[in-house]
Each structure stands twice: as structure tokens, then as C-alpha cells.
Image: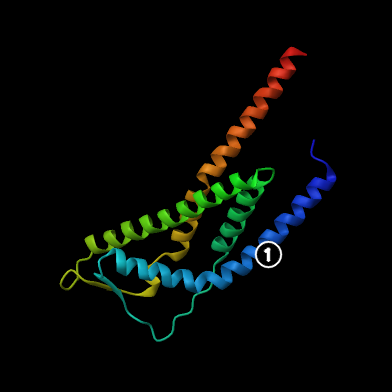
Amino acid sequence: MIGTKRILKLGILWIFIFISSSYAAFWCADHYDKLIRYLYVLLSDHKISFRIPVKYMYFVNGESLLSLALFNIIAITSFIGQPVKQIVKNVIVILLLVISSTLLICYLDSFAKLVTCTACQDSRLQIEYSDIKYDAIFIISLATALVPTIMRQIKKLRRKQFKNDLYANHH
């Protein structure tokens, strides 16, 4: 049974993570969008370019904000009780998965945009900033990075349940 103090500590930790994640989401949104546009250009071998809008305003939507908060809550909570060396390994794996899934999504989507382009001039495509689904890329990248962590937690719960069942059957 989880104690009241532990629940209170976890609740405070989750609130802190949520507030910190919200701040990070607002602070990083513009930088992330610029990175995604750069990746589209780079990964398409400069065949995709962007029309620079007169005015472009983008704000983090609720799904991205909640996804980042949930991502951080799951990741950080899963680190509780692990040795520092294991935490460092897990953080590196998570970061590599976020980066590689972002790269893969940007590559596949830029390739798809070029393949489906019917009005391309000289195999070049000029698109609007709003033609990119930044939030979807962000959310899918975060979800992909959490797969090993979630699998590890499921395994841990199954092992614990198996031990409890084994103990219950012998007594």
C-alpha cells in the first residue's frame, strides 16, 4: 500500500513537473518550429523551401503542452529508485529516440510532400509554415521515446504481480 506521505510527495512532484513542462513548452515552441523547418529543407536536399509569411504567430496548443507534461511525468517517475548510472543511460536512450524519431518523421513527411507535389517547379516545392504539423511531430516523437520506458514499467509490474501471485499461492 502506498502511504499518504508518498502520494503527497508524488503529487507535488507531478505538479512541479507539469508547471516546468508548461514553461518549457512555451519557451521552446518557436525554436522547435524553426528546427523542424530546417530539417525539412535539409532532409529534402533543399528541394523544399518555405514562403516567409508577413506575419506568423504560433502558440503551443494544449495537446503539445499536455504531451510534454505527461512525457516528463512518466519519464521522471520511472527514474525514481534507479541508480544514477541507470538514469543517465535511460535519459540518453530517451533523447536519442526523440531525436531519431523527429528526424525520421521530418524525412518521411518531406519526401511524401515532394512525391505528391503536382505543381512543383524543377522538383522544388515551396510551402507555407502552416503546412507542417509541428504538434503531431512533437507528440509522436515524445510517444516513441517513451516506448522503452513504458515497456520496462509494464515488465516491472508483471514481475511484481507474479511474485505476489506466487506468494499468495504458497500461503
Q: What residue is shown at x 52% (from left), y 42% (from top)?
A: 148
Q: Residue at x 64, y 53 (%)?
A: 73
* Snapshot quadrant of residue 44: bottom left
Can you identify the residue that label 1 sits on?
19
Q: Position of residue 169 (x, y in %)?
A: 72, 14
Q: Quadrant of residue 39?
A: bottom left
Q: Is residue 155 left or right of residue 118?
A: right
Please say if 114 is above or below 129.
above
The C terminus - image quarter: top right
Q: Indicate the quadrant where residue 163 lies.
A: top right
Rendered residue at 28%/63% (across/down): 113
Residue nearer the viewer, 108 or 82: 82
Q: Is residue 128 left or right of residue 120?
A: right
Is 165 positioned to the left or the right of 25 in the image? right
Q: Is residue 99 above or below residue 60?
A: above
- Amino acid type at mark 1: Ile
Residue visible at 38% across and 74% down in the picture: 129
Q: Residue furthest top?
A: 170
How many callouts does the rendering have? 1
Q: Residue furthest front?
A: 85
Front position in the image: 101 or 114: 101
Whole-percent x, y for residue 102 in the image: 41, 58
Q: Quadrant of the N terminus?
A: top right
